[in-house]
Amino acid sequence: MGSFAGREPAKRTVGVLGSERGVGVTQFCVALANFISLESGSNVQLLDVSGTGQLARVPVTADKRLFGVTYFADVDKKQIPALMSRDYDYMILDLGSDRSCNYAEFLRCTKKIVVGSFCLWKRQAYDDLMQFVKNEAGYTDWEFCALFGKKEDKKEFKKRYGVPLRAIPFLQDPYELGREDFLFLKEFTRGI
C-alpha cells in the first residue's frame, strides 16, 4: 500500500488465518480494515468466516458501515461469491483458526496472513500450522505474524521455516489506532 495517492485500487482479498483461537485474528482484522479505510479511503468489507461470532458483537447490523468498513458477521462460505461481486476495493476475511473448514478460502485470497502467538502455551499450535503449510506452493510469499515474540523467536522461526516473522504490537483498540499501531500497519500493508 505505502502511499495511496494517485493509485487506482484493485479488488484485493486478504485472508487472515490463526494458528489457534485467542491469538488475535479478529482484533488484527478490524485494525487492518480500519487502517486501510482511513489511509486510502478505500471501500473495505470485513467478513467474519471464523464461526466464532465475534464480529456479531460489533455495534452494527449486517451490511452496515462503521468507520468506513462494511461488516458482515457470521458469513457462511456459500455467501462469499455473492459478497465478492459487490463493490469493494478490499475484502478482508477473518478465517479464525479452523483450517479444516477455512483453508480453501484462505488459499483463494490474493494476500495471505497467518497470525499466531509465541506464548509458551500457544507456540506448539503455530509450529503445527507451519508443518501443515510449509509444503504449500508459494507459502514463502505469505505474511507470518506473531504476538508476544522475542527477537530470538523471530530468528529461530526464519531459520526453521525460511520465512520472516513480523511481531504484531499490542493493538489496544482497533478503532482508535495509536501512533505505533499506525506505523506498524503502514509498513505491514506495503504491497497489499
Image (tube, helix red, strand yellow):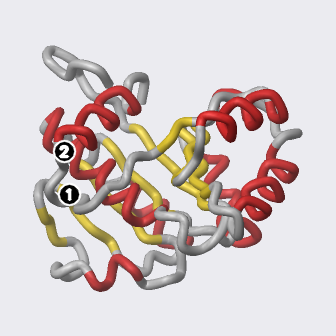
Residue drawn 70% across the image and 59% down it: 103
Q: Is residue 11 left or right of residue 38?
A: right
Q: Residue at x 40, y 53 (%)?
A: 92
> For the residue marked with disc 2, what is the amino acid?
Ser
Dot 1 crowding, Cα within 10 Å, few <14, some 14–19, many 20+: many
- Please report the residue visible at 43 percent of the width from the left and 70 percent of the height from the top: 48
Please, is residue 163 above or below residue 144 in the view?
Answer: above
Q: Amino acid at mark 1?
A: Val
Vertical order, 56 against 42 (above or below): below
Q: Residues at badges 2 and 1 in contact (C-beta under 8 Å)?
A: yes
Left or right of 30 on screen, residue 23:
right
Secondary-structure class at tag 1: strand
Quadrant position of residue 170: bottom left
Q: Earlier in the sequence, mark 2 or mark 1?
A: 2
Q: Label 2 to label 1, Cα distance in Å?
A: 7 Å
Q: Which residue is mark 1?
A: 69
- Residue visible at 26% across and 32% down in the picture: 183
* Mark 2: secondary structure: helix
Task: Work out whether residue 176 or residue 78 is closer to the camera in this orientation and state it.
Answer: 176
Q: Which mark is residue 37?
A: 2
On screen, 59 above or below 77? below
As rendered, which of 40 and 148 lies closer to the eye? 148
- Residue 139 percent coordinates (x, y): 73, 35
Q: Is residue 39 above or below residue 32?
A: above
